[in-house]
Image (cartoon, helix red, strand yellow):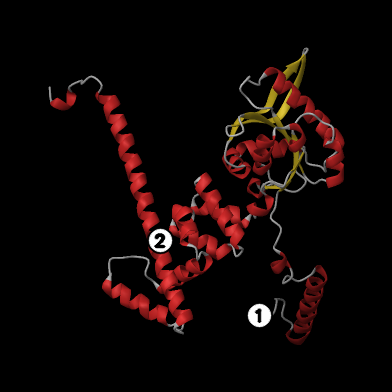
Amino acid sequence: MSETDLVIEGYEAFLTGLKQRIRQGQIKAALAVNKELVLLYHHIGQEILDRQKGQGWGSKVIERLALDLKLEFPEMKGLSPRNLKYMRSFAENYPDEAIVQQLAAQIPWFHNCTILDKVKDHKQQVWYIQKTIENGWSRNVLIHQIESNLFARQGGAITNFSETLPPSHSDLAQSLLKSEYNLEFLGLQEKAAERDLEKALVNHIQKFLLELGVGFAFMGRQYRIEVEGDEFLIDLLFYHVRLRCYVVIELKTTEFQPEHSGKLNFYVNVIDGTFRHPNDNPTIGIILCRSHRQAVVHYALQGMTKPIGVSTYALTDTLPETVSRELPSVKQLQNELEAVAARFEEKKEEDGAETLPE
């Protein structure tokens, strides 16, 4: 029997612990390297910026600098003219090195580049950095969150949380709900039925959880509850690990109606009365509807004792205004088609051809 075949008491636990410690060490080392790299890039960017402003160096100095640095450090990546321009922009956006150390240096360099590219408002830049740190977003997830305008949507749901929850819990709950949820990934048409919407959300639960935000744990679809022999089915039930409470979601493919809140209030009461643990916080209800009128929602929630929020969802992305302005109108398209048809008829008469002109 070889030494590798011997059973050593406690060895497996020792090996597991050692592997975990090594992985933690690797992560810490990678984070430390990233931090130093980002700080170095900030310093380089600041130096370029200072000399361009103070000594009148032009933009072409970056090309020369990239070439000279590459000759000196041929093995080092990230010294291209494009990356040096990112460094300059980075330093310009974050002149305070303390903010860089506390925030920007905690995320990968190319995450910072993505934020610089796609977000121009400084307040929003800092917000996306903070959310990336909190949620551990990959670069692709970060891009998705920016392009879906998460900053504007986060915390914008209409709720009665301030009247029904303790202040500290109310603020956190409010910050986690969005005014509108982007469900484009479902691939559904605008007139999809509630069951189709519900089924698609469950089939794409990973993407739905990403859109809901960090902390949601899926408990079930058409979740059965019973009250005095009568059966009721909750569309979607979740548990939120940060809020430490159940979250009931009701789906509506129509505009919000006051009776929707009454039904959800009933469900929240039942979950509180039958499922809620003494250490859990009050259950929260969310109505996810196609559209709503703010005053109608306000009056529907007024006076209710259970925490309820109302948000909308979008199944397809609307084109940005800057893009839609460039697109032809229906009338313009019709006129163009009529002109093409007229030219085609003229061509046919001229040469007797039966095919479209090139």
Could you tell me which quadrant the C terminus lies in? bottom right
Q: Which mark is residue 150?
A: none
Q: Is residue 154 above or below residue 193?
A: below
Residue occupying the point 85% across, 38% down: 257
Residue under pointer 2: 39
Residue under pointer 1: 358
Residue 298 location in percent, x, y? 84, 41
Confirm whether residue 236 shows in the render: yes
Q: Is residue 353 above or below residue 231?
A: below
In whole angstroms, how far apart are the C-alphas of marks 2 and 1? 58 Å
Residue 25 location in percent, x, y? 32, 42
Most distant residue in the top direction: 228
Q: Amino acid at mark 2?
A: Leu
Residue 42 location in percent, x, y? 43, 65
10 Å neighbourhood of mark 2: few (<14), some, or many (≥20)? some
Residue occupying the point 46% across, 81% down: 54
Q: Nearer the viewer, residue 80 or 134?
A: 134
Quarter of the image holding residue 279? top right
10 Å neighbourhood of mark 1: few (<14), some, or many (≥20)? few
User: CB atoms at circles 2 and 1 under 8 Å apart?
Assistant: no
Q: Is disc 2 placed on a helix, strand or loop?
A: helix
Q: Is disc 1 placed on a helix, strand or loop?
A: loop
Residue 352 location in percent, x, y? 74, 82
Q: Nearer the viewer, residue 318 or 293?
A: 293
Quarter of the image holding residue 210? top right
Q: Is residue 295 left or right of residue 25?
A: right
Q: Is residue 68 left or right of residue 131?
A: left
Confirm whether residue 288 shows in the render: no
